[in-house]
Image (cartoon, rainbow, N blue to C red):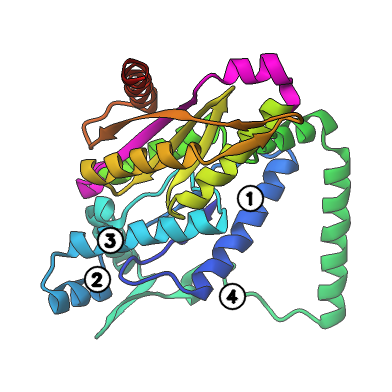
Amino acid sequence: MYVCGPTVYDLPHLGHGRFSLVFDVLRRYLLFSGFDVHYVSNITDVDDNIIKRAAQERRTEPEVAAEYEARWWEAMDALGVLHPDDSPHATGYIEDMIQLVGDLLEKGVAYETSDGVYLDVGQVDGYLLKPMATDTFIEAVRRALAHGALVAENRNLTTRLERLSQNQALYDPLTGLPNRALLDDRINQALATCRRNHSALAILFIDLDGFKQVNDRHGHGVGDDALRAVARTLTRRLRTTDLLARLGGDEFAVLLPHIDRPSAERVAADLTRVIATCTVDAGDTVLHLSGSVGFTLIDREARDDEQILVEADRAMYAAKRAKALTV
């Protein structure tokens, strides 16, 4: 499934949100219906508008494109749109496009004007269709809908349920947060952006202190309330572009894109403080929670998401040991 993506020279607008949501719904429906969907949406990272803006702002074209591509993904994340499986960039295919345009001109199916080269659709077999009578058109639509309904009805139910389960499995059922699978996907997306833009990201690893005792002494219901309270508190504290995920048990992770070390240190310290403000009603007492937070800063040299999480986990346990020594 191919959807034409944005030209990254300005902020996303309402029209971008509309088409992104429409195709996201279509993609999810096809997945639910049991289809294998490989979703591709390009990024046009060089064109006249990008060149013009770069000249006006005395920046390079890649700097302009990188800034507004980052803002594009932030907007898509805010809308809850799934990322494409592939996002080819125009700058990676310049020679191929020049060759394709030349071939089209040579074959006589394109023509050149003062402002560019255009496809001559009249030369493409089947592109221009004969007008269809209204009643014939309506009948054709009815047949197509009936056929589609039969196909959908006869599709293997188990496959459809499995597809639905895969989509639902991207989120933790207890807290509603993204889970490890979705976090891995977003880390890989952020790493790709880091390599292109020469930027950095941070991963925070969070572990609640003494959480096993909460479950053992007060029951798993109170423990679940504690996890939900922490999830709500951390979510309110983070930027809309950050991603908070629950990895399992009392472990959380935060993806912080476009950040430097001092800022990541401040966020880690801030989240440690806000976790300490969380309280849970355990019936005859009120529990005060605390947590340990460690982080690792990642640049374009990072190898994979597994390595990143291991490093962040080590940093978290170092913070937990330091806290124990201080106490």
Kind of residue at badge 4: Leu
Gap between marks 3 and 2, in whole Å?
11 Å
Which badge, 2 or 4, is on the more N-terminal residue? 2
- The image's mark for residue 27 is 1
Q: Residue 76 placed where, x, y %?
A: 49, 57
Gap between marks 4 and 3, in whole Å?
40 Å
Q: Residue 131 placed where, x, y %?
A: 71, 81
**Residue identifier under label 4:** 128
Q: Which residue is drawn at 23% across and 65% down?
A: 64
- The image's mark for residue 67 is 3
Which badge, 1 or 4, is on the more N-terminal residue? 1
Q: Residue 135 placed where, x, y %?
A: 87, 79
CB atoms at circles 4 and 3 under 8 Å apart?
Answer: no
Residue 199 inside the magenta-drawn segment: yes
Q: What element carries label 2?
A: helix
Which badge, 4 or 3, is on the more N-terminal residue? 3
Q: Is residue 209 left or right of residue 144?
A: left
- Report the span colored magenta: 195-221
Q: Residue 321 placed where, x, y %?
A: 34, 16
78 vs 113: above or below = above
Which badge, 1 or 3, is on the more N-terminal residue? 1
297 vs 104: above or below = above
Q: Residue at x 38, y 28 (%)?
A: 305
Report the mark closest to the observer, 1 or 4. 1
Question: Foreground: 175 or 271?
Answer: 271
**Residue identifier under label 2:** 50
Question: Foreground: 41 or 96?
Answer: 41
Q: What element carries label 3?
A: helix
Kind of residue at badge 3: Glu
124 vs 31: above or below = below
Kind of residue at badge 2: Ile
Question: In the rendered image, which quarter contains the C terminus?
Answer: top left
